[in-house]
Amino acid sequence: MTDAVTAKASGPSLPTRLAFGFGGAAEGIKNNGFEYFLLFFYSQILGVPAAMVFLALMIALVVDALSDPIVGYWSDNLRTRIGRRHPFMYAALLPVGLTYYLAWNPPEGLSPNGLFIWLLVLTISVRLSFTMYEVPSTALVPELTPEYDARTSLMSYRYFFAWVGGLSIQIFLLFFLLKPSEQNPSGYFHIPGWHLYGAVAAGVILLAAAVSTFGTHARIPHLKAPPAQRNLTLGKVFSEIFETISNPSFRALFLATLFGLLASGVSASLNQYINGYFWGFTTTQTAGLTVAVYISAVLALIIAPIAGRMFGKKRAALAIGVLAFTIAPAPVFARLIGIMPPNGSDALYNIVLTITIFDLSLIIATQMLMGSMVADIVEDSEVQTGRRSEGIFYAGISFIRKLAQASGVFVATLVLTFAGIQEGAQPDKVTDSSLTSLGWGYAVTLLAAWTLMMFCVSFYRISRETHENNLAAIAAKAAEEASH
């Protein structure tokens, strides 16, 4: 039996799925740090105005956004002895670890302006390094298997390790590195803990990227070959890029990803404020919430493949997503209308804990299904254009993810400004009116963004039957070309 037939029948082997999936831990740790803690660290801990932190992140994202289509198109067309994806992945290994370490370890004595420049330079460096790794790495999905459900399995492992990796480092930070004291009862202002976090996280990022890169190396001979060499002009390159991304299903997922990650970005950026300020949880309690999310990741790893097989990816994503966005802001709304237990009570913590476990499992499962849906666009586009453009599609998703993260930080900054929460404010110094404004801004934004995401997903056109028809059409064309 040929490798292609084997892949279609059963999908990639378990070692391949694990190696590919483990690579997601690198991106998960980076995203966790940048989304949940970077704004908080530089503004609340180091004292840089939140607007300046946002400006640095936005400039870095604009620079980084230019790299996504370049790396995606380049990796689609690169011709080397080790394939077209792995040269980028190998080149990125050391930079992804080193730059992440430096982002959390600025030199001592820098003024707010100096910290702004340091953050800007390092954020650009981190993001460019991760583009070199993540875009070619995720573009391997359609090449590792053409099978509809096997792709869901691959992306489920990727998202599982991304969440577990990010959560594990976050737990380590909250439990062991941010040490409370009499002057700092919350533990958040223990700066040496943040520096050590940067070192540990950078080491795990390097390990995860290396395992995924080396672990998929053996598959290089079985991956898709680049297109035949052509005389390409800059105009031709951009013409092909725009033709590729004009695919209707890609547009639907592109916009859905924007709104979904906008919600995630707002949630992540305000997470420390909601847990530490709105609910009044200690770092130990917040760490307990984080530990519980392991259960969410495991549940999602089970839910997503089963739902995808039973209902198809689009219908499953819609059903699970609607349930998830309904549940996500519910506890905050309940507090705002006065039906939640008071802060400091065990009942409040247990309610938030239970809802977090269940809701996050649905959110992660939705992400897994949507990630797999991107892979199926590759053959749909190939039927229309005659070209395989895995790198372009995943570069587009990478681009919109970064734009959404920037938008999430921006919206989070607006919510903080609206709530009147100042840089460096301790939780017990924030007024009740500020907490109420924080809650309304957080909950309403999440509800609106998730609703828009589900609306966009509804326009995705590729079903299981459509995908099988695309594979058959591609195979028939290949047979016809081989006969001539």
Image (spheres, grey):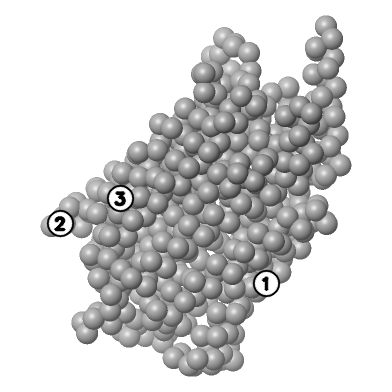
Is 254 situated above or below 66? below
Q: Which residue is drawn at 54% across and 91% down?
A: 347
What's the residue type where badge 2 is placed?
A: Glu
Which structural element holds mark 2?
Answer: loop
Is 263 situated above or below 71? below
Q: Are marks 1 and 3 in contact (CB under 8 Å)?
A: no
Q: Where is residue 51 in the image (x, y as percent from the top left)?
A: 33, 59
Estimate the spatial distance between the alpha carbons at disc 1 and disc 3, rounded to whole Å.
Answer: 37 Å
| Sequence-earlier tag: 2 or 3 | 3
Q: Residue at x 44, y 40 (%)?
A: 210
Question: Is residue 233 or residue 195 the one in the foreground?
Answer: 195
* Residue annotated with mark 2: 108
| Sequence-earlier tag: 1 or 2 | 2
The local crowd at label 2, few if under 14, some if 14 to 19, many if 20 or more residues have their Cα within 10 Å, is: few
* Residue annotated with mark 3: 101
Instruction: Tell me, yes or no, if residue 108 can be seen here.
Output: yes
| Image position of 327 (left or right of 477) | left
